[in-house]
Amino acid sequence: DAANPVPTYDTATKPIWRNSNGIVGGNGAFTINAAAAAIKSFTFGTGNSDVNPDDPNQTDAFGPAIITSRDFAGSINPYETAVATRDIMSAFKSMTSAVLHARLGTAAGNRIGVTIPAAQYSGADPSDNNGLNTLTVPFDAVGTDASVAQICVF
């Protein structure tokens, strides 16, 4: 009879999305055009389409995946502000892009940063979060492949 194995658990925990050092731009932040924005969620997806090309020289008769197209898009839901502070509807109507930046985590190797240099809003739907006015704002990341988004784990 073999002894039961003793499990070991990773001590790393997922980072919390908050500003842990008390200043804007600290360890956890979300900004729209470099201005702090209070939001509940920030979602995005790469929208990659890929193909594994036929290749008789490979063991399984096909090569590694090649990305053939991308459609990086997502959504944010910032709390409403005065139009003088942030006017998402005008940006949406004029097709003006915004820089979105999210940062979370404090421990080396467990920090994540996401920057979308040119997010073009594709709508703006009024919504409610516990009695506070928010906007649900879908966006498309525009630009060349290298500048659509940067995702960094550091």
Image: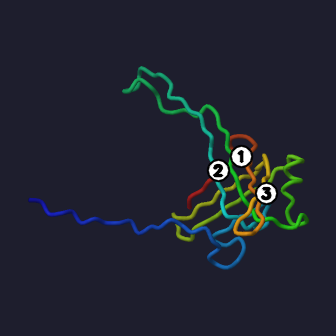
Residue at mark 2 to residue at mark 3: CA–CA distance? 20 Å
**Image marks 2 and 3: residues in contact by CB distance under 8 Å:** no
- Say which quadrant the N terminus sits in: bottom left
Q: Amino acid at mark 1?
A: Ser
Q: Looking at the image, is mark 2 or mark 3 nearer the viewer?
A: 3
Query: How dense is the environment of label 3, judged by Cα within 10 Å: few (below 14), some, or many (20 and up)?
Result: few
Q: Looking at the image, is mark 3 or mark 1 nearer the viewer?
A: 3
Corner quadrant of residue 100: bottom right
**Image marks 1 and 2: residues in contact by CB distance under 8 Å:** no
Q: Amino acid at mark 2?
A: Phe
Q: Which residue is mark 3?
A: 126
Q: Which residue is mark 1?
A: 147
Residue at the far bottom in the pictured view: 22
Label whose residue precedes the other's in the sequence (2 or 3): 2
Q: Which residue is mark 2?
A: 44
The residue shown at (63%, 60%) is 113
Left or right position of 108 against 151: left
Residue at the far top in the pictured view: 56
Query: How dense is the environment of label 2, judged by Cα within 10 Å: few (below 14), some, or many (20 and up)?
Result: some
Residue 114 % position (x, y): 65, 57
Instruction: For mark 3, give the secondary structure.
Output: strand
Q: Is residue 16 above or below residue 89?
A: below
The residue shown at (70%, 59%) is 101
The residue shown at (91%, 66%) is 84
The residue shown at (78%, 65%) is 133
Q: Amino acid at mark 3?
A: Pro
Label whose residue precedes the other's in the sequence (3 or 1): 3
